[in-house]
Image (spheres, helix red, strand yellow):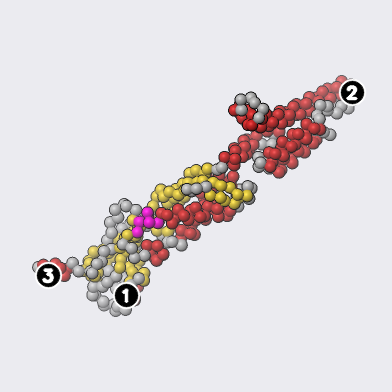
């Protein structure tokens, strides 16, 4: 009886894999010195794929289901081993199971700020992080390129490679999107879509599919973040010159308060900006008063309205210089600057 038990253990008649939920991507069925019985049962559960490998060459691939292993169900292996259709002997073959379910909440991030090229700013240094999900889509390619003959290959074994691919492709994603970085940074869904589109072909080379990717945070250098905040504020006021002056004054007041009322450092800068903004408001008010006064006098005297007074050329030039500084910092576009310049120059006529 002991001898019969020993002989029986040398043949496998049931092949299956029950996942343990430990992040295993590929698992080799333990063969040792055993052989597979002809007519053995193969069970492949949902979210699994089984692959038979003969002498290092991928043969038959089985999706979810229950199979009786014969020459009819193993056509590639039968061809590779030159079996005839009536072959019924036990046989040797490596069997690998692959998990095809989604691997969720995989983290990615920039350990150090990375430099990217941008059409607006030339170069930008940023930090970003998020998560992604993937699954094995091509077990044959995954076995050939990644897991190989290892008994177990896990998500942790692949983690470093995938995170490296994400970081490597951030710059290409931004460049390929054709959008300025500020637009992508302000819309993280758009940023994630651009990055996922760039990464998909790279993942497919490994036999895996990128199911989803999120960008949860983008951290910019302080000076660039200030410009972004100012552009958002300008978007709220549009091209209204009065609102623009009010917005800039509101931005300058807190900086002046932080300086304690002095005339140097941050406070001095705030005073300079506030003075330029206030000057613009005074110019607008004087122009409006002059036009109204001239119109009223003309109506009373029955003559043409007099030219407006109180607008000095040097005041207009000072305001233009301040607007030029805002344009150079990226707060105003060239079109916005030209429009405001034309508006101010009209006041000298």
Secondary element under disc 3, as helix, strand or loop, is helix
Q: Given the current orientation, which residue lies at the most extreme left position? A: 1
Depth check, mark 1 against mark 2: the one in front is: 1
| 290 to 9, vertically: above or below | above
Foreground residue, 306 or 328?
328
Indicate the quadrant where residue 49 lies: bottom left
Q: Residues within 10 Å of mark 2 (few under 14, many from 20)?
A: few
Q: For residue 71, which quarter of the picture?
A: bottom left
Rounded to the nearest angstrom, the CA distance separating label 1 from label 2 is 110 Å
Distance between the alpha carbons at the discs numbered 1 and 3: 31 Å
In the image, residue 77 lies in the stretch drawn in magenta: no
Q: Nearer the viewer, mark 2 or mark 3?
A: 3
Task: Check the image and name the residue furthest to the top.
Answer: 300
The region drawn magenta spans: 153-158
Q: Nearer the viewer, mark 1 or mark 3?
A: 3
Instruction: Say whether residue 154 is magenta.
Output: yes
- The numbered disc on residue 3 is 3
Residue under label 1, please give it.
Answer: 78
- Which residue is rendered at x = 64% and y = 36% of the image? 234
């Amino acid at each position: 009886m002991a001898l019969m038990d020993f002989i029986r253990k040398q043949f496998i008649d049931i092949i299956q894999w029950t996942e343990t939920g430990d992040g295993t991507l590929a698992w080799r069925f333990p063969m040792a010195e055993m052989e597979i019985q002809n007519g053995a049962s193969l069970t492949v559960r949902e979210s699994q794929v089984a692959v038979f490998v003969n002498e290092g060459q991928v043969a038959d691939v089985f999706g979810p289901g229950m199979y009786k292993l014969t020459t009819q169900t193993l056509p590639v292996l039968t061809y590779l081993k030159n079996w005839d259709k009536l072959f019924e002997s036990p046989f040797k073959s490596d069997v690998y199971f692959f998990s095809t379910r989604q691997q969720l909440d995989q983290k990615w991030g920039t350990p150090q700020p990375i430099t990217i090229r941008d059409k607006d700013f030339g170069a930008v240094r940023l930090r970003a992080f998020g998560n992604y999900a993937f699954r094995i889509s091509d077990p044959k390619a995954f076995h050939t390129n990644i897991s190989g003959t290892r008994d177990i290959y896990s998500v942790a074994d692949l983690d470093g490679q995938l995170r490296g691919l994400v970081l490597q492709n951030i710059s290409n994603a931004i460049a390929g999107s054709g959008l300025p970085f500020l637009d992508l940074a302000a819309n993280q869904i758009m940023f994630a879509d651009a990055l996922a589109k760039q990464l998909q072909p790279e993942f497919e080379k490994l036999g895996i599919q990128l199911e989803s990717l999120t960008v949860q945070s983008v951290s910019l250098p302080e000076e660039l973040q200030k410009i972004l905040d100012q552009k958002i504020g300008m978007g709220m006021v549009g091209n209204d010159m009065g609102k623009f002056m009010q917005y800039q004054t509101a931005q300058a007041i807190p900086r002046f308060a932080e300086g304690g009322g002095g005339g140097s450092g941050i406070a001095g800068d705030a005073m300079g900006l506030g003075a330029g903004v206030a000057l613009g408001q005074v110019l607008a008010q004087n122009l409006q008063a002059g036009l109204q006064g001239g119109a009223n006098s003309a109506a009373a005297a029955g003559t043409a309205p007099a030219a407006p007074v109180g607008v000095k050329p040097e005041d207009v030039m000072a305001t233009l210089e301040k607007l030029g500084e805002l344009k150079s910092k990226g707060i105003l576009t060239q079109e916005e600057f030209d429009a405001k310049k034309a508006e101010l120059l009209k006041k000298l006529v």
